Amino acid sequence: MDFKRLIDVRRSLRAYSSRPVERDKVERMLDAARWSPSSANRQPWRFVVVEHDAPERLALEEALDAGNSWANRAPVLIVAGAVPSEGLVVESREYVLFDAGLALMSLLYRGADQGLLVHPMAGWKEAPLRDALGLPDSFAPLVVVAVGYHGKPEELDEATRKKDERPSTRKPLPEIAFENRWGVPYSTKIPSCPAKVFETDIQLRFRDTDAMGHVNNATVVSYLEVGRLRFLVELFGGEQVRNIPFIIADVSCSYRAPIFLHDQVRVRIWITDISRSSYRFRYEIFNPADGRIFVEAETVQVMYDYKAKQTIPLPPAFLDVVREYVAV
């Protein structure tokens, strides 16, 4: 998966499916953590993996705070922490938590890369957690990580569901990064949000639905095509669009919620990651009535000379027209 896409896909959501997680996927997550960098290669991290049918599972669930009861549905819980005595100390600086954080981030990204929902939690009680898993005094537990597949948001209680429906936000880059000295905001050239986004409504058809009563996942890709075509026609006109020679090199979709025939559906589009001969469309398929996001997606377009059978640079005129729609 493209790294930028991986960053966008990784979300700490709470709706889990009861579908079991394949053991090899968990092993890949642990192996990614194992290969994380650490100070002086001390590797102080440790992980305790508890599956849903393990005898210790019920006691572990009881150690979680009430607000994290949604995690009981996750097929796998991983207690992540470190052995402080194995961490590097330089002057008075202890690097054990830094190392453990690096390993945990590798574990989270590898899970998301495999299509899993991975949610680290701070809400648990240490004494019952230690008793549940027989943790030694030499080990410091830091987080409990819920691992599983995306479930149905409608199965969550209302308060928990609203937490997941909140948009993901971050502080602007100049607020967290400084240039040359503290307090001097780092200058940015690429906007974090596009000046403009293109939106268009999709008319649902009965034939779009499948036996489950919602819009078939494969049909959603055709909505991306409709949105993309309307976007290009809006900017360049129908005749000129025919003269933009590109091929679709990659399509990726993350399905957040089912689309039903009675839903209002709109596609929002902007552009990211422009390079010499390719550019990336970013999509959100959502309900304009309540803001619910059904699908987040990306497509990569590569400019292509069909006669010469080779890629070609993006035309400067194309870049001039789409400039306001570009963001990271």
Image (spheres, helix red, strand yellow):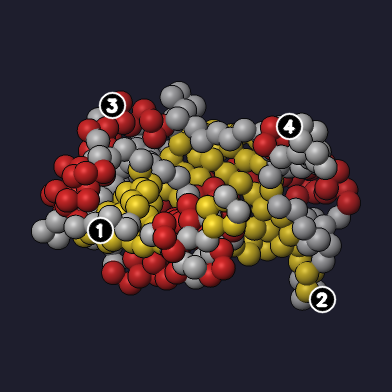
Location of mark 4 (residue): 195
Location of mark 3 (residue): 158
**Mark 1: secondary structure:** loop
Measured in 3D between alpha carbons, the distance from the residue under mark 1 to the one under mark 3, in whole angstroms, is: 38 Å
Q: Of marks 2 and 4, which one's residue comes earlier in the chain?
A: 4
Of circles 4 and 1, the one toward us is 1
Using a 10 Å C-alpha cutoff, classify the residue at mark 1 as few (fewer than 14 neighbours), some (14 to 19) or many (20 or more).
few
Q: Quadrant of the N terminus?
A: bottom right
Residue displayed at 31% across by 54% down? 79
Q: Of marks 4 and 3, which one's residue comes earlier in the chain?
A: 3
Using a 10 Å C-alpha cutoff, classify the residue at mark 4 as few (fewer than 14 neighbours), some (14 to 19) or many (20 or more).
few
Q: Is residue 126 above or below residue 29?
A: above
The amino acid type found where label 1 is placed reads: Pro
Q: Of marks 1 and 3, which one's residue comes earlier in the chain?
A: 1
Q: Quadrant of the C terminus?
A: top right
Residue displayed at 24% across by 57% down? 135
The amino acid type found where label 2 is placed reads: Ala
Location of mark 2 (residue): 308
Of circles 2 and 4, the one toward us is 4
Q: Residue 295, image x and y in percent? A: 46, 44
**Mark 4: secondary structure:** loop
Q: Residue 12, image x and y in percent? A: 41, 43
Q: Residue 15, image x and y in percent? A: 31, 42
The amino acid type found where label 3 is placed reads: Glu
Q: Look at the image and tell me whether residue 21 can be seen.
A: yes
The amino acid type found where label 4 is placed reads: Ala
Of circles 1 and 3, the one toward us is 1
Dots 2, 4 in contact, CB < 8 A: no
